[in-house]
Amino acid sequence: MPRSFDVAVIGAGPGGYVAAIRCAQLGLSTVCIDEWKNPQGKPSLGGTCLNVGCIPSKALLESSENYERAAHKFAAHGIKVEGLSVDIPVMMSRKDKIVAAFTGGVAMLLKKNKVASLHGRGTLLRSIEEHGDNNSGWQIEVKNGETVDTVEAKHVIIATGSAPRSLPFAQIDNQRILDNAGALALTEAPRRLGVIGAGVIGLEMGSLWRRLGSEVTILEALPTLLPAADEQVAKEALKIFTRGSGLVINTDIRISGIQTSEASIAVEYVNAQDKEGNVQKLEVDKLIIAVGRVPNTAGLGADNVGLKLDNRGFIEVDSDCRTNLPNIYAVGDVVRGPMLAHKASEEGVAVAENIAGQAGHVNLDTIPWVIYTSPEIAWVGKNEQELKAAGIQYKAGQFPFMANGRARALGETGGFVKVLADATNDRILGIHMIGPYVSEMIAEAVTAMEFAASSEDIARIVHAHPSLSEVLHEAALAVDKRAIHI
């Protein structure tokens, strides 16, 4: 007989394992099914985020920034460094240890909360009701190589995440043509690195390897950099990345072909602004493909049970992450909304609480976005171009990090904070940042928006001095044209 649970969670990334733990906390018998294996072939929980995404990329970004500081910034502090070198294998080993600690930590958390863990691919087989069982629910096959197990659950939470989007003319082998996993596993900095795609992954990986010595050229199909960000922030980012950070970023590009030889990889492309259509060629030693991600629904068994997907492969859900099938939910990258780990986790919590009869909810309008470049970029809410397009009257206040004492002490003065507020009632509509450690500062902005704060509320709150958060304070003051230090 198949083992029976209240809840089966398919996927152990930030959406899945968090959902499983919350279900268990609420007294629901829970199993978490996951097929990820590490390079040694062993089960490794945590999904893309912990294994080849958020955590390893931030570990390497921090290492590369430390090297950059020692090479180019310590001298201004009176710190002299002689014989500086970088040992990339050691850097990778540190990253791998961090990953192992966190993936092992997830396994311990599941065990601590009495969540059963099954390794293998989870596939929906059928509704138990279809075969006359009085207990409604779902049957799931878990296949691990030749081993096949079957479990039954009244409720199912799908959290299978996403996979890198591929290009038909660029076969990823993670030796020379790389996806995010390959970009995080290089053992040396390539002399010439190409990146197709100037989104979050492209910019972070390009920045990482540029700091470690690579000549980096990024090719972006869209006419502007970071169209989801506030236009002014995106322009500031382009200026800093190209002038200060040494990245070469070409936008409005059409790739016409990629040719590989023993010596190099040649990317042929046309700039859409070139009326004559002249073909240009970029020769690199390694090429990162970072053109977005697609929902991971292959092998899930959607056809077996009639689970509805949209034309892009996302599982269709309502505002509470319910699918078209009774007692089946989906969260994270596999559904609508931003592909962000923290969004997936909070959806997992909300679904668990709704299953338990509570009132879980996620406000998609206040999900923070962060790009871990240097300087960092973060935002929440609407940007100026969205407000203009919607015809919403607003006020804007802005303040630069250049005028902030803590930023000056850090030697990181690029960027600014912008606060957008409703022109009629002063309610905050969006907050946008580019500067040092704004990944930490954005939480105050999210809290303010969740509590329907006005710019006046932030302006009246005492912020510690000297601190980077004072830039947000001054930007809020500037909404009413009363910033003090500019």
Image (spheres, rainbow, N blue to C red):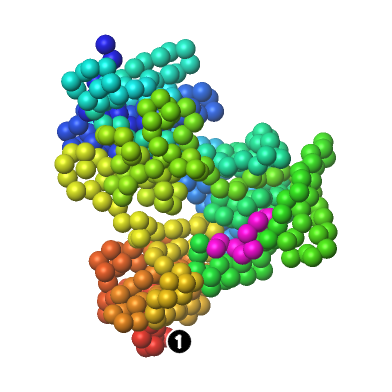
Residue at x 32% of width, y 44% of height = 321
Residue 221 located within the stretch drawn in magenta = yes
**Closest to the observer, 279 or 314:** 314
Main secondary structure found in the magenta portion: loop
Residue 54 in the figure: left or right of residue 264 = left
Is residue 100 visible in this depiction of the protein? yes
The N terminus lies in quadrant: top left
Q: Nearer the viewer, residue 169 or 246?
A: 169
Quarter of the image that includes the C terminus: bottom left
Q: Indicate the position of residue 414 as horizontal and vertical percent values.
A: 54, 72
Q: Nearer the viewer, residue 243 or 327?
A: 327
Q: Quadrant of residue 246?
A: bottom right
- Magenta stretch containing residue 320, yes or no? no
Q: Nearer the viewer, residue 108 or 405?
A: 108
Location of mark 1 (residue): 486
Q: Which residue corresponds to the image point at 79% horizontal and 39% vertical from the top-left?
A: 260
Q: Position of residue 108 (x, y in %)?
A: 32, 31
Residue type beneath disc 1: Ile
* Residue name at image x 21 percent, y 43 percent: 354
Residue extent of the magenta highlight:
217-227
Above or below residue 45? Residue 180 is below
Q: Residues within 10 Å of mark 1 (few under 14, many from 20)?
A: few
